[in-house]
Each structure stands twice: as C-alpha cells, then as structure tokens.
Image (cartoon, rainbow, N blue to C red):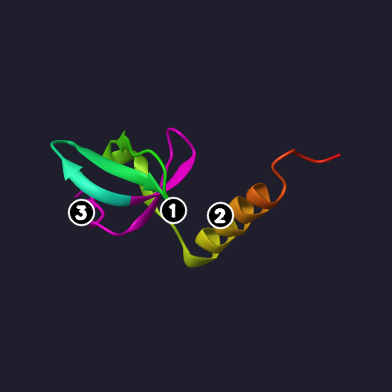
Amino acid sequence: MSEPAPAIGDTVRDTVRGRVGVVMDHLGTYLQLRPVHGGCEWDARPEYVQPIAQADLLGERVAQANARSNPGGSR
C-alpha cells in the first residue's frame, strides 16, 4: 500500500533533485513544489518526495540564510 500524497502546505524533499520545497498544488500525477523561501515552482512525482523532519527543515533554513548573508562565497 502506498502512502498518500503530501497535502498542500507540507514541506517535502524532492529526492530526484535533492531540493526542499513546500507543496503548492497537485496537478495531475505531479506535485508543484516551491522553495521554502519562495522562488520558481517545479514539478515532482509524489513517489519521489519524502516528508521532511522539522530538524532538517531548520537546517535548510539556516543554510539558505547563510547563503544570503555571504553572496560572494568564502574568501
């Protein structure tokens, strides 16, 4: 028995792209995901997404904040 598709608003990891996103919509056999802090949506198959733990979500947000605070990269 397969797991139900994530609900709109759930945060998931796209295992194919290695990205974390929020489920914005269900379109046919695909989910539309958007990056946690906004950006362009992408399509993902429900069988290739996993729910993300709150600790992992926090780590993702810290990584994105660090990237924003250091746009030139490390020196």
Q: Residues within 10 Å of mark 2 (few under 14, many from 20)?
A: some
Q: Which residue is mark 3?
A: 4
Rounded to the nearest angstrom, the CA distance separating label 2 from label 3 is 24 Å
Label 3 residue SS: loop
Is 48 positioned to the left or the right of 37 in the image?
left
- Could you tell me the amino acid type at mark 1? Val
Residue drawn at (50%, 60%) of the image: 57
Q: Nearer the viewer, residue 41 or 23?
A: 41
**Vertical placement of residue 7 versus 46, above or below:** below
Rounded to the nearest angstrom, the CA distance separating label 2 from label 1 is 9 Å
**Nearer the observer, disc 2 or disc 3?**
2
Label 2 residue SS: helix
Which of the 4 image quadrants contains residue 33?
top left
Q: Earlier in the sequence, mark 2 or mark 3?
A: 3
Label 1 residue SS: loop
**Nearer the observer, disc 1 or disc 3?**
1
Which of the 4 image quadrants contains residue 51?
bottom left
Residue 45: give x, y in percent of width and height. 28, 36
- Could you tell me the amino acid type at mark 2? Glu
The disc at residue 60 is: 2
Residue 39: give x, y in percent of width and height. 42, 43
Is 9 positioned to the left or the right of 4 in the image?
right
The disc at residue 36 is: 1
Residue 9: give x, y in percent of width and height. 29, 59
Q: Residue furthest left?
A: 28
Magenta region: which residues? 1-22
**Vertical placement of residue 54 versus 20, above or below:** below
Q: Earlier in the sequence, mark 2 or mark 1?
A: 1
